[in-house]
Image: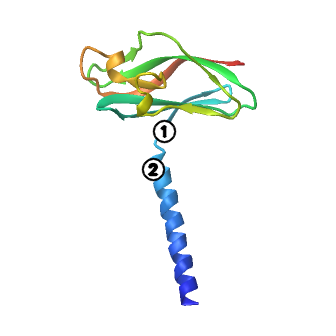
Amino acid sequence: MKKSIFFTILLSVGLFMGSISHGFASDWTLNKSTGNVDFYYKIGECNGQDAIFLKIVNKNNYGVKVTWTDVVNDNVSGMNVEARYGLKEHIVAPGASLQSDCSEAESSDLIVLAIKIIPTHKADITSFEFKNIKVITN
């Protein structure tokens, strides 16, 4: 009986701690939601460089094409800086989400390296904006 109670308590604490740590591990910031598609970002580091990780979640039961422009807020210059490389575009399957990790930093446009947007100085990125978003049924 004592073993059963101890095991139940141990399991409960483990599940509780797991749910807490899971909540903190998910530090994505919702930037915009339009056309039943959510656009998130997370500021971090990738291979020693400041980076912004992007995530797009399609909550529709049909595929969509999304386009947007990257804008970062640089605390050093005090300005919002729009990326010079222009519009980004992705196809997102029904109910799917898109995101990348550091292993794809050079090839994925879902990772924005600060130096590519602000090459003149070491930026202090405080926020990100998906600008001019369009969601089109695919």
State left or right for residue 138 relative to residue 27: right
User: Residue 119's image quarter?
Assistant: top left
Number of numbered discs overlaid on the protein picture: 2
Q: Residue furthest bottom?
A: 1
Q: How is the image coloured?
A: rainbow
Q: Quadrant of the C terminus?
A: top right
State left or right for residue 137 relative to residue 97: right
Task: Say which mark, if any, is on residue 28.
Answer: 1
Task: Say which mark, if any, is on residue 122.
Answer: none
Mark-to-mark CA distance, 2 and 1: 10 Å
Query: Which residue is found at the position 47% from the left and 23% from the top?
Result: 108
Label 2 crowd (10 A; few <14 / some 14-19 / many >=20): few
Query: Which residue is found at the position 44% from the left and 26% from the top?
Result: 111
Image coordinates for residue 5, horizontal then vertical, percent: 56, 83
Query: Which residue is found at the position 30% from the left and 21% from the top?
Result: 78
Image coordinates for residue 45, horizontal then vertical, percent: 34, 34
Amino acid, disc 1: Trp
User: Residue 132's image quarter?
Assistant: top right
Amino acid, disc 2: Phe
User: Residue 75's image quarter?
Assistant: top left
Q: Quadrant of the N terminus?
A: bottom right
Image coordinates for residue 37, horizontal then vertical, percent: 64, 29
User: Could you say which is closer to the camera, residue 52 or residue 132?
Assistant: 52
| Residue bearing mark 2 | 24
Q: Is residue 6 visible?
A: yes
Q: Residue furthest right?
A: 61
Image coordinates for residue 107, horizontal then vertical, percent: 45, 21
85 vs 76: above or below: above
Which type of secondary structure does the marked residue at label 1 adopt?
Answer: loop
User: Could you say which is closer to the camera, residue 9 or residue 82?
Assistant: 9
